[in-house]
Amino acid sequence: MLQLLTRLLKSPNLLTGLYVGLSGLAFAAANIILASVQTIDDYAIFALVVAVITLSSRIGLLGADGMVNRHDIAPDARMFYRVASTGLIAGIFTASIMFNYYDVGISIAFLLIIAVTMLAIIFFAAAYFQSRQDFQLSLILLNSFNFVLLAVALTAMANLWQGTLALLVLTTVLLVLVAIFCVVVVIHKYQSVVSGFEYDWREAVAYVSIVGSASVLVQLERLLTPQLLELKDLATLGVLLAIVGPPFRLLQMTLGYVLLPKLRAARGPTETKLMIKREVGVALAFLVPSWLFAWVLVPIIDSYFFGDKYQLSAMLIFSVIFAGTAKVLNGIARASVAALASAKQMEAIGISGWIGVALSIAGAYYGASFGLGGIVYGVSAGWIMRLIIAVMFVRKYVGAMPPVSSAKD
């Protein structure tokens, strides 16, 4: 029994579910606390900046997270310098957009640049540990931002820090500390790793095109809502995603996270198809209780914590459940594509991903006339398109794989 318990605790799937689940709870708790103690406008701005930091840091990696999972790369000082440089460029670009189009102010824009750069370093370290199948440390770092947000929310609840600017200062300081920890630990643990792999920028850009378009889609409702509707609608969306989102985010991260390195090691079409089918089966088994959980729990939490502060209608709840389901299935599809596609195939799939983003933007503009739920449904159009393309690719790829011959004694 003890040996069985030990094996379960070391299981990558269980570890992923545990850490992502705790991270989801931290994210939900942080947003519920901030939404209840801040004004609607302050919470909306904070939630928007946090979404932009997450999005920009993913793009700021410029494919480095994918490269370390697809190839054997040494985590030397040059690699961290590359990640920090691309993260800094992404941060500056994003900060200029936020300053000019969202009127966040120069101080917040400056903090955003630092936060994006630091989170890019953290995500790279997490990806490197993932590539080495050091899942425990990888998952801690991958989900560290949500625990940072929880710490910030608790200080706001205790009246130690107040105001959007002060909370973002604390957020940035904590991210700097985590990033320093990442660099020290990665170099210390893998300083002896030597690699002759020549970094392929073209492949890295193709990978970030796939991941970047998905990251844009994840945050697109938050980015478009203040432009198409009002800050109150953005705050309402933030609250709803904080409550409904964690179960779906848990499934999306858990299934895709462990599947990617496993597919890279799969032997032949039979094993590849079996892995993917198993992941889809697990997803469907957990999606049904997630739907029921969201449908029942949202009204209870809304009534207990917020009263009449936010209007969470049944139609709005259903739209977020629909979008969450599409994101879960895309998590499996994205991991499959990242593991199986060649560099040239990834370029084509990456382009189709940005076409999906354009479709989502068009859908959101059309759906805005129906309110916040219409924006959520409109953005989901891009997820559906990505899913269809990924399924077509995987079916074609697996069908073309040569069978594995049995070894003869």
Image (cartoon, rainbow, N blue to C red):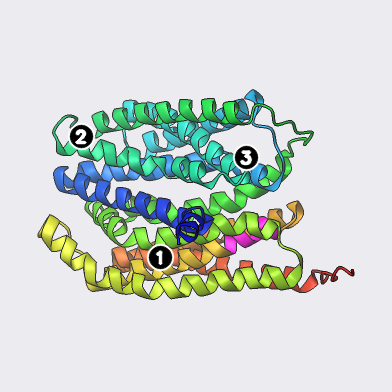
Side of 97 relative to 47 (left or right): right
Give the x, y percent position of residue 349: 66, 59
Q: Can you tell which mark lies on residue 248?
A: none
Look at label 1 and name its amino acid.
Gly
Q: Which type of secondary structure does the marked residue at label 3 adopt? A: helix
Which residue does the numbered mark 2 point to in the structure image? 155
Look at label 3 and name its amino acid.
Ala
Side of 330 relative to 175 (left or right): right
Which residue does the numbered mark 3 point to in the structure image? 64
Q: For this rendering, which residue is in front, 367 or 334?
A: 334
Residue at 44% from the left image edge and 57% from the top image edge: 17
Give the x, y percent position of residue 163: 20, 33
Q: Which type of secondary structure does the marked residue at label 2 adopt? A: helix
Q: Which type of secondary structure does the marked residue at label 1 adopt? A: helix
Which residue does the numbered mark 1 point to in the structure image? 324
- Asked which quadrant contains residue 322, the reply is bottom left
Magenta stretch holds residue 337: yes
Mark 1 is surrounded, within 10 Å at the Cα level, by few (under 14), some (14 to 19) or many (20 or more) other residues, namely: many
Q: For this rendering, which residue is in front, 56 or 1?
A: 1
Give the x, y percent position of residue 283: 48, 70
Q: Which residues are magenta?
A: 333-340
Mark 2 vs mark 1, CA separation in Å: 30 Å
